[in-house]
Amino acid sequence: MTEIQPLEAVPNPLQSQPDFAVPTELESALDQVITHYPQKRSASLMLLHAIQERYGFVSEQAVHWVAGKLDLQPIHLLELVTFYPMFHRRPVGKWHLKVCRTLSCALAGSYGIHRHFCETLGLDAHAHGPQTTKDGKFTVEFVECLAACGTAPVLMCNETLHEQVTEEKARQILGGCA
Ligand code: FES
């Protein structure tokens, strides 16, 4: 009879944050947000955004905490955090460079800009997913269409959109990140 091999555990996509705790003032503000919706569940995205704004990312413990607040199962929050790319599953650098790699930007040179950032910052241009420098200052990643295809290639540095980015402009953007 064939021996059944134990299944390998699926890695948790969220970083653990054992010291996660929500201060009273934030919890009260979030309780208030929940009252704005006819069903608690509808406040899911708002709560996740508020958590990310406070802690910089959404951890495993944060997902459990929000699930408890909204009377949901953690999987209901996990599916949102892993679907929407604006949620960070682990801490990101002070400067977050998101380079669009969808068709218009790819054709206009976004891969070269991404490579320029990676080479300048000592990151691997071929690695999958976001990469952060050891000093925690920069995170570089490819993202999908940023809805500015007419001015490709585009990228975002934190919340600022940069259009028609040349390698020279990319150098200036990096230089402006103090
Ligand atoms: S393809 Fe890059 S913004 Fe749309």
Image (cartoon, grey):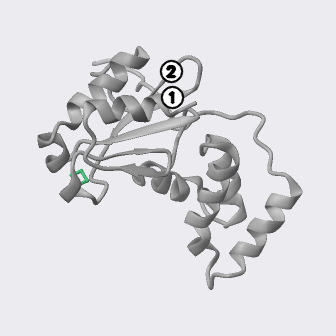
Q: Which residue is mark 2?
A: 133
Q: Amino acid at mark 1?
A: Phe
The quarter in which the C terminus is drawn is: top right
The disc at residue 138 is 1
Is 128 drawn above or below residue 64 in the view shown?
above
* Residue 39 left/right relative to 13: right
Coordinates of residue 42 in the picture (x, y in percent): 57, 74
Alpha-carbon distance for marks 1 and 2? 6 Å
Q: Amino acid at mark 2?
A: Thr
Is 18 drawn above or below residue 45 in the view shown?
above
* Residue 5 left/right relative to 148: right
Coordinates of residue 157 in the picture (x, y in percent): 45, 43
Marks 1,2: beta carbons within 8 A: yes
Q: In this orientation, which residue lies closer to the viewer: 156 or 174?
A: 174
Pointer 1 or 2: first along the chain? 2
The quarter in which the N terminus is drawn is: top left
